[in-house]
Image: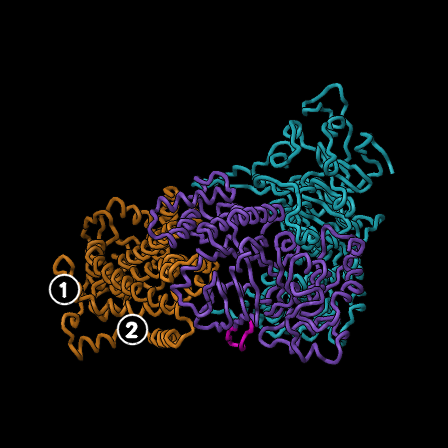
Amino acid sequence: MSDPFLVVEDLTVKFPTEDGLVNAVTDLSYTVEQGKTLGIVGESGSGKSVSSMAVLGLHDMRTARITGSIKVGGQEVVGLGESKLRKLRGKEVAMIFQDALAALHPFYKVGSQLAEAYLVHHPKASKREARRKAIEMLDRVGIPQPDRRVDDFPHQFSGGMRQRAMIAMGLINDPKLLIADEPTTALDVTVQAQILDLLQDLQREFNSAVIIITHDLGVIAEMADDILVMYGGRGVEKGPAKEVLTRPQMPYTWGLLSSVPDVHGDTASKLVPIPGNPPSLLDPPSGCAFHPRCAHVDKVAGNKCVTELPPLTAGPTGAGHLNRCHLADPVGVFETEVLPVIAPELLEES
Amino acid sequence: MFAYIVKRLLAGIVVMLLVSLSIFLLFWYGPSEPARAICDSKTSQRCTPAKLEVFTEELGYNNAWYTEFPEYVGGIFTGRDITIASQTTRCDAPCLGLSYKNGKPVWDEMKGRLPATFSVAIGGAFLYLLLGVPLGVAAARRRGTVADKSLVSSFLVLSSVPYYLFALLTFLYFSVLFEAPFIGNPGYVPFTESPSGWVGGLALAWICLGIFGCTQYTRYSRGAMVEALSEDYVRTAKAKGLPQREVVYKHALRAALVPVVTIFGIDFGTLLAGTIFTEKIFDIDGIGLWALLAVGQKDLPIVQATALFAAVALILSNLLVDLLYSVLDPRVRLS
Amino acid sequence: MTDVNHPPHDPENPAVTEGEELSASNEEQKLTFAQLAQTGHAPTELDPDAEPVLSVDNLKMYFPVKSSGLVRRTIGHVQAVDGISFQVPRGGSLGLVGESGCGKSTTGRLITRLYTPTGGSMQFGGKKQDIARMSNRELKPLRRDVQMIFQDPYTSLNPRHTVGAIVGAPLEVHNVVPKNKVLPRVQELLEVVGLNPEHYNRYPNEFSGGQRQRIGIARALTLNPKLLVADEPVSALDVSIQAQVINLLQDLQQEFDIAFLFIAHDLAVVRHFCPEVAVMYLGKIVEVADRESIYNHAHHPYTQALLSAVPDIKQAGQGRRERIRLEGDVPSPINPPSGCRFRTRCPLAQEICAKVEPPLLQIGPRHKVACHFAGEIGRHPATPVTSGLLGVDRQGSPDPAVTPQPIGTNPGYDKQWFDLDSQQMVSA
């Protein structure tokens, strides 16, 4: 097992705005190894996208305040100069975005956008070579007749094809890390399945490290080796995918599992919403950011949830699975109280 | 695309007919006595009602407008003979009538003024685009900084100065007070006569139009750039590792140009149609001032001709802009 | 240039501190998990005896495609909806699922008469009035009974109107209550959807996405509609808010006896909310059944592919599930495939599929499917089950030896159906 390709340590990102300082990401730490997939789960305002954009240094350096450490292949990215960052972007680390129709330039042919991505990092290559490479990549991602479609514009592609083209563009320089920000959210479910298959095949082929950012627990379950749950700009649970999804240790994760209906689950299971609204990043709640919406605050002695921020520490099952919660026995609470409500059929299995 | 151009030109012709007709009708049904101008001029200001009636009859104002109008339109293609004060003059195609003031064919006079108008308009537009767009781009890139804010606010102040005042002040300083060399003597000199004279004579006009127009175009470009820079595809371009220069100019600017080009299409047409203050203050014999004078003198043929010219200018510049769109944005399919 | 009335499209940075806007029910005390679980909603149950409030028969919507050039002629039609029939029971819900281009959104707009159908009938209400052919004037009183909830809470509310104006507008249009009663009614509605009634003077951009959706729902409820067409009502919302809104809709349905046509692409949400589901593909209904039959006993290969494509949480740590893979893209609705529209991507397609369009055949008490080879996964018949009924042979050519049986065109369910195992008509 090699050293992790990406090491994020105590990352904090703040943006000053007219209304005040937005704490988009606070003290975030995680790692990703090559050949493995990390799934980052969170809703809007959780900081998941902001943190991954920081990996590429995509924030406006004049306004964003970034502290902490992000090491890409051993190289420190925070505070790195723009010209050195550019060498990483699209080469060592590539990012693909949610809405391919908006993320691809509408005025330029798909092929030339791919070729551009190649030429930036291979300046000595000829235009013909770059075009050949673009066609090769389009073929690799399963676009039929790539030599003809290379001259099409993004609006002439279907949604799924566009997303494939964007993946092709991301992988054209064999990056060691691919960050996919909500790669399938805008797509139909059958197309989503094709894209996820593709991502998995390509990961195996290139042995890249992959980060998938999404709010869809099903996608995370099928794609991720490890999961990081984010809430209010912090990591609140982290561990192997199976662990986090079958024996979650944080009430927010329980809330997610109980409030999202499951096509393949028991028809008798109830939908229990998380009350309230996502936290404000301008004026976050004191102590644990989730406490205003947490139904288990009464199980913690005193007022700890309100006054004290819980640290992200190993849970009762060991060092691999961390949670940010004051509950003494999260596994117990989960199995006795939560599981019977949300998935009675899983009780028999576990 | 060819079919599109043809369609637009056909529609344009309809517009020109309508414009021409409305001016026509204004004189037919308007309050003034249309023949008075010519009567005064031909009788050296001793116009009597009897003489007025003669001229009115001669010019056809006693006939119905729907018989006179087609003659007018026909004259544009084939030329016609016009009788004034019992004198018949041949007015060659394109016949836009004879001036009521001096009896000369309108087209001849117009022909002489067109180069001046085009020189002023093209030079001014070139300057304000050259200044405005890069400034707007620069401001957008530095959005929110002191430089940006001070640029925006100073341009706001500048653009709230009435144009004629701005032009007058320019004239005052450069021409009268400082008698600046080379440019201090504004006036139109045909390019064919003297290229340097052409530049020198128009320089002040260009500077005025340029700086004044620049305040608008900086604002448009800045707004369009700010929006373009916040688009997802700009983020993608950055994420690919493109240098900032390419991100801004190749990706963002091309999209930002679309709204700017739209406005320019209308602006340029209007600019061509008449920059009256500029012409008056900087002594340029263009179409704008000429048109204004004609209205005051009720010289109908000139008024009609200049209105037609304005319509043509706007139609053509809009068509050009639409064609330019389809070049900029491949999603636009002209149909 | 920022537009103060339209917020930056970034829910990460709402204009107002979220904390203030907690729904009324949670402001007073914190619920323990046990109490919270009590508020949890089980999936809506089916009421088999309910009369239909909407009965749609052979509904069609063709959009003309015009040529370019000097003279614009109609050179074809987008067959967005091509002959669909279904029923929505009173006070119940029918889910309409399918992928992009299947025609489900168009269907929603047809029901609310935002479009005028090209063909077919839509019978509404106890008096079974056909709203397909009515003029706008005749429709006006009926518009009170059929309302729509839209997908995007950020763009479906006029940013220049106050919340009170938005919710109160239907009352003013239809002159239902005297002017002085409008405000109390508006406040009542805001409370019903879980918003603070004192906020009627605020503008939409002061609310979060979930709250805006509630405002849209309140507006739809203003005139006590009998049928709500919900077009992707929760897909633009955050996951933790989706459940709140779904539960709200369930509560409203129960309290006010409102029927729902629930249009969505999210099969899981539809499963929870709708006791009956219709699956659409390229303008046709390919399968319609009650929840249990669709999700656990789907018979149409497209439904099966759709269900297998949805990722499964239980797969955690085990990689991708085995699933039915559909190749290619959805064909163009201007030139749909002959016979069965799904055949170009169907793993079971045979000659008969290209020749004969499979009828929507009832195969169970509450289950209809349109496929020549209908069957559960792994148990699809080798020979077409419909050939006998349609009077054709196994390749789809007309067979004089077989007399075709009349296949019911009832938009609802008959008491008799065609049993696939015995290949005979049976009754309950």
Shown in cyan, the chain is C
Q: Is B16 displayed left or right of A105 in the figure?
A: left
| Neighbours of disc 2 within 10 Å: few (<14), some (14-19), many (20+) | some
Determine which residue is flagged by label 2. Answer: B164
Mark 2 residue type: Tyr
Q: Residue at x 81, y 51 (%)?
A: C46
Magenta residues span A14-24
Q: Is B286 displayed left or right of A237 in the figure?
A: left
Magenta span: helix, strand or loop, mainly?
Answer: strand
Shown in purple, the chain is A
Q: Residue at x 29, y 76 (%)?
A: B165
For label 1, the SS is: helix
Task: Give the mark count.
Answer: 2
User: Where residue A296 is drawn, which disc sits there?
Assistant: none
Mark 1 belongs to chain: B
Looking at the picture, how far across and down is residue B282, in whole percent? Answer: 21, 69
Looking at the picture, how far across and down is residue C273, in whole percent? Answer: 74, 54
Q: Find the residue positioned furthest to the front.
A: A1
Q: Which comes sooner in the sequence, label 2 or label 1?
A: 2
Determine which residue is flagged by label 1. Answer: B197
Looking at the picture, how far across and down is residue B327, in whole percent? Answer: 37, 50
Chain B pictured colour: orange
Measured in 3D between alpha carbons, the distance from the residue under mark 2 to the one under mark 1, in whole angstroms, is 24 Å
- The quadrant the N terminus of chain B occupies is top left
Query: Residue C400 lies in magenta, yes or no?
Result: no
Question: Between B13 and C130, which is closer to the camera in this rendering?
Answer: C130
Mark 1 residue type: Gly
